[in-house]
Structures are given as structure tokens and as C-alpha cells.
Image (cartoon, rainbow, N blue to C red):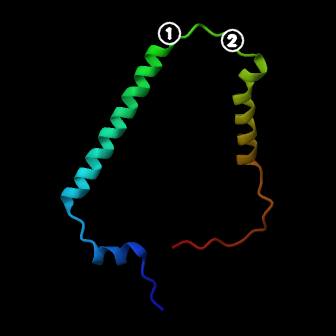
């Protein structure tokens, strides 16, 4: 039984030209640059407009440290799954 990938079927029906691919890529790049530029402007200008905020509570500041400790614990704890052979190609 032969399995045909959906993208292989589409290649026969709709020929893609290299100019359309470069146009799509250029469009995506320009949108990405525009979004990053707007994000940079908002980061630079919003602190000048908004009033200063009070510092957050100490427990809220320790939340990222707690998350990091939990992730390290999960990463280095032994697995409870039985030993199963891993097939590599």
C-alpha cells in the first residue's frame, strides 16, 4: 500500500512559481519587521506616558524562581515508565 502525502498531490494540481514564493516570503518579512518595530515603539513610549507602578509583592517576584525549581525537578527526576527499547533510524 502506497501512502501519498497531501502536499505531493497538490504539487501536481497547482504549479508554484518561485516568484510567488519570494513575494510571499517578502510579505511575511515586511509584516514581521512592522510588528517588531511597533512593539519596540510601544516599549519605548509607554513608560513615558503611563504613571509609575508600585513594586509587586515579594511572593509574586519569587514565582518565576519557583517555576524554575519545579521544572528542574521534573527534568532531573527519574522516569516512572518501564524501560522500553527506543528504535532509531
Discs 1/2, front: 1
Q: Residue 6 appears in which quarter of the rendering?
A: bottom left
Q: Residues within 10 Å of mark 2 (few under 14, many from 20)?
A: few
The x, y position of residue 9, in whole percent, is 36, 78
Q: Which residue is mark 2?
A: 55
The x, y position of residue 86, in whole percent, is 63, 71
Q: Where 72 sits versus 85, above or below?
A: above
The x, y position of residue 51, in whole percent, is 58, 7
Q: Where 7 sits versus 80, above or below?
A: below
Label 1, label 2: how many angstroms apart (C-alpha)?
Answer: 18 Å
**Residue at point 40% right, 21% down?**
41
Q: Camera-side residue: 81 or 50?
A: 50
Q: Camera-side residue: 3 or 84?
A: 3
Marked residue nearer the N-terminal end (1 or 2): 1
What label does residue 85 carry, if any? none
**Residue at point 27% right, 72% down?**
14
Q: Which residue is mark 1?
A: 49
* Count of labels in the image: 2
**Residue at point 28% right, 49% down?**
25
Q: Residues within 10 Å of mark 1 (few under 14, many from 20)?
A: few
Q: Camera-side residue: 58 or 9?
A: 9
Q: Is residue 16 left or right of residue 76?
A: left
Amino acid at each position: 500500500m502506497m501512502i501519498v502525502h497531501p502536499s505531493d498531490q497538490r504539487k501536481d494540481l497547482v504549479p508554484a512559481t518561485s516568484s510567488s514564493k519570494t513575494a510571499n516570503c517578502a510579505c511575511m518579512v515586511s509584516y514581521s519587521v512592522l510588528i517588531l518595530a511597533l512593539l519596540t515603539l510601544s516599549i519605548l513610549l509607554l513608560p513615558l506616558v503611563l504613571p509609575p507602578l508600585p513594586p509587586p509583592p515579594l511572593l509574586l517576584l519569587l514565582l518565576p524562581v519557583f517555576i524554575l525549581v519545579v521544572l528542574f525537578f521534573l527534568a532531573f527526576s527519574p522516569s516512572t515508565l518501564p524501560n522500553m527499547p527506543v528504535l532509531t533510524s
